[in-house]
Image: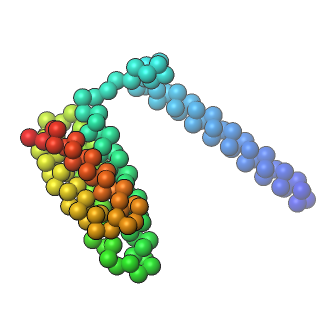
């Protein structure tokens, strides 16, 4: 077997694997929709919504923005910007608390109002810390997501 045959064989194998992955991903997606009863409903915009949808969306956005803020802070601290340590710590806590809030809201937990109160406090701490570092776009976006999450928590908190 010469080099050319080896390369053609490897390319053929890679193409077959990629095609198999695409097929498997498409089949997995189809099965997920069927399993969840969403195959036709989702396609026609009749997806079931929960009464906590605004809170779920705000918490999900907060999780994402906190992750991005944390990663930015870690990279910046690695370059010597030690003043971002407090922002990194609180954004890590915010990410964890908002992920829990998102999950409990989706489950329509009876403890959701109590959790929302705690998350409001964590988000307020994060919002305050992000204001100190809002010259960084990631920190500013995280603080804004916290503000939105606080608003939605207030609507549910006991």
The residue located at (42%, 73%) in the rendering is 76
Left or right, 17 with respect to 149, comes to right
Tell me the quarter of the picture where residue 116 sits.
Answer: top left
The residue located at (34%, 23%) in the rendering is 48
Q: Is residue 39 visible?
A: no
The residue located at (29%, 39%) in the rendering is 56
Q: Please state which of residues 128 and 7 is positioned toward the viewer in this rendering.
A: 128
Tell me the quarter of the picture where residue 132 sits.
Answer: bottom left
Single out the residue that lies furthest toward the left: 158
Left or right, 76 with respect to 133, comes to right
The residue located at (21%, 44%) in the rendering is 151
Residue 29 % position (x, y): 52, 32
Q: Please state which of residues 36 and 60 is positioned toward the viewer in this rendering.
A: 60
Q: Is residue 87 above or below residue 52?
A: below
Quadrant (top left/top right/bottom left/bottom right) for the N terminus = bottom right
Tell me the quarter of the picture where residue 135 sits.
Answer: bottom left
């Amino acid at each position: 077997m010469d080099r050319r045959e080896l390369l053609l064989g490897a390319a053929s194998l890679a193409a077959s694997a990629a095609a198999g992955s695409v097929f498997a991903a498409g089949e997995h997606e189809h099965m997920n929709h069927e399993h969840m009863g969403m195959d036709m409903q989702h396609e026609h915009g009749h997806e079931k919504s929960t009464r906590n949808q605004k809170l779920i969306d705000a918490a999900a956005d907060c999780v994402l923005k906190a992750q991005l803020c944390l990663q930015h802070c870690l990279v910046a601290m690695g370059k010597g910007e030690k003043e971002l340590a407090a922002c990194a710590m609180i954004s890590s806590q915010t990410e964890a608390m908002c992920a829990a809030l998102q999950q409990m809201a989706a489950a329509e937990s009876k403890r959701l109002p109590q959790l929302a109160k705690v998350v409001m406090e964590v988000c307020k701490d994060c919002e305050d810390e992000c204001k100190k570092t809002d010259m960084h776009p990631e920190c500013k976006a995280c603080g804004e997501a916290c503000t939105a999450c606080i608003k939605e928590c207030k609507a549910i908190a006991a």
